[in-house]
């Protein structure tokens, strides 16, 4: 096992992280987590125990700065003309609903180069916006403007009003003939299920079970390979910080999961014995879902928060607004 230090603000551990290596903040852009709508298996008794996770997300907002800004191309006439021409050759995107609290199972949402084929917004700009409300909040007399192309209704009227806005977008790239998904910082977040190895980057946010892990890359004393800093959010380890040196993990791995053999042990019934594995290579710090040594994936998945544009490909799964989608590109 490699060397690491941990800061346990909730457990009273005496090993503390240097104060100058910690914390960036943005209270507005990170989504709240709703444990009642998790797409993993649980019973009713677990829901009450998961309630504190809503408060945990407030703490995450204080510890991560995510860029939820996006370029508005609605009035770029040159681009729209090119999109219209691209309709003759552009790939088509299909989103299939695998499970949802409010949408019919197996519903297929069709998106082309101009946007959603049955857009509520009725603006063909190559962007499809999703949210739990059709319109923005009214600023005066009458209804607010239509801002979403597709609505994923919420079962909770209070939450629907609280999270009124554009939750995530799908954007068509003319040059690459590809579709990209990105969370817009409203609602419960948009997360991609990891199906292949992921090169970890600064401020990545991982979701597993009822827990979140914030990734930071910290300069090492020799200024060569960056140290890996992982901060946990979610009971009972909220606030715990772990450091790992790259030189210790060229030939060994960091395991995160429920068992005592894991370098980071998390007591969460929704995560696997070995939920994910991390190691260091010439490419950087690499994360793989599940137990890499035994070639076994996790039961409920390891998820990446999509605060940046992420290219969609066949078979990908992502979740947002209590709904799980599968991607098909034709």
Image (cartoon, grey):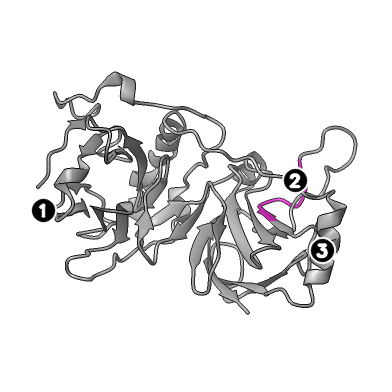
Residue 122 appears in the figure: no
* Residue that carries the numbered disc 2 in the rendered image: 72
Q: Earlier in the sequence, mark 3 or mark 2?
A: 2
Marks 1 and 2: which is nearer the front?
2
Query: How dense is the environment of label 3, judged by Cα within 10 Å: few (below 14), some, or many (20 and up)?
Result: few
Q: Is residue 237 left or right of residue 59?
A: left
Q: Is residue 77 above or below residue 89?
A: above
Residues at marks 1 and 2, CA–CA distance in whole angstroms: 48 Å
> Residue 216 appears at what percent x and percent y?
35, 38
Q: 235 left or right of 75?
A: left
Residue ID for mark 1: 261
Please state the horizontal and vertical placement of residue 92, each as a whole percent of the image.
68, 74
Q: Evaluate whether residue 64 shows in this view.
A: yes
- Nearest to N terminus: mark 1 or mark 2: 2
Residue at left offset 76%, top offset 43%: 136
- Secondary element type, mark 3: helix
User: What secondary structure is found at the residue carrying circle 2?
Assistant: loop
- When asked about the image quadrant of residue 138, the answer is top right
Q: Residue furthest bottom?
A: 330
Q: Tell me the magenta residue range.
A: 129-136
Q: Quadrant of residue 64?
A: top left
Looking at the picture, tell me which residue is in the foreground, 69 or 98: 69
Cα–Cα gap, marks 3 and 2 = 16 Å
Return the x and y of residue 325 as percentages of the image width and height.
54, 67
Q: Which residue is mark 3?
A: 82
Query: Which circle's residue, 3 or 1, is located before the other in the chain?
Result: 3
């Amino acid at each position: 096992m490699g060397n690491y230090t941990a800061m346990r603000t909730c457990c009273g551990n005496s090993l503390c992280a240097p104060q100058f290596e910690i914390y960036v903040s943005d209270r507005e852009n990170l989504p709240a987590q709703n444990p009642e709508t998790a797409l993993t298996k649980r019973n009713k008794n677990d829901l009450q125990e998961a309630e504190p996770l809503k408060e945990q997300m407030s703490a995450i907002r204080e510890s991560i700065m995510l860029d939820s800004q996006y370029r508005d191309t609605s009035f770029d006439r040159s681009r729209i003309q090119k999109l219209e021409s691209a309709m003759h050759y552009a790939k088509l995107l299909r989103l299939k609903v695998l499970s949802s609290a409010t949408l019919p199972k197996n519903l297929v949402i069709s998106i082309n180069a101009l946007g959603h084929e049955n857009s509520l917004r009725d603006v063909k700009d190559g962007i499809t916006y999703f949210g739990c409300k059709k319109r923005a909040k009214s600023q005066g007399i009458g209804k607010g403007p239509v801002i979403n192309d597709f609505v994923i209704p919420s079962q909770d009227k209070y939450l629907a009003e609280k999270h009124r806005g554009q939750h995530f977008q799908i954007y068509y790239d003319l040059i690459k003939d590809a579709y990209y998904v990105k969370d817009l910082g409203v609602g419960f977040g948009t997360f991609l299920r990891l199906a292949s190895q992921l090169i970890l980057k600064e401020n990545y946010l991982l979701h597993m079970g009822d827990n979140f892990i914030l990734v930071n890359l910290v300069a090492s004393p020799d200024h060569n390979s960056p140290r890996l800093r992982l901060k946990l959010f979610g009971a009972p380890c909220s606030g715990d910080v772990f450091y790992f040196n790259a030189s210790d993990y060229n030939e060994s791995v960091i395991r995160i999961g429920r068992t005592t053999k894991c370098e980071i042990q998390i007591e969460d019934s929704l995560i696997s014995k070995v939920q994910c594995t991390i190691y260091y290579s010439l490419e950087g710090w690499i994360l793989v879902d599940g137990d890499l040594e035994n070639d076994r994936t996790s039961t409920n998945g390891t998820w990446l928060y999509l605060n940046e544009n992420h290219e969609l490909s066949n078979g990908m799964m992502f979740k947002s607004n209590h709904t799980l989608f599968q991607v098909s590109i034709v």
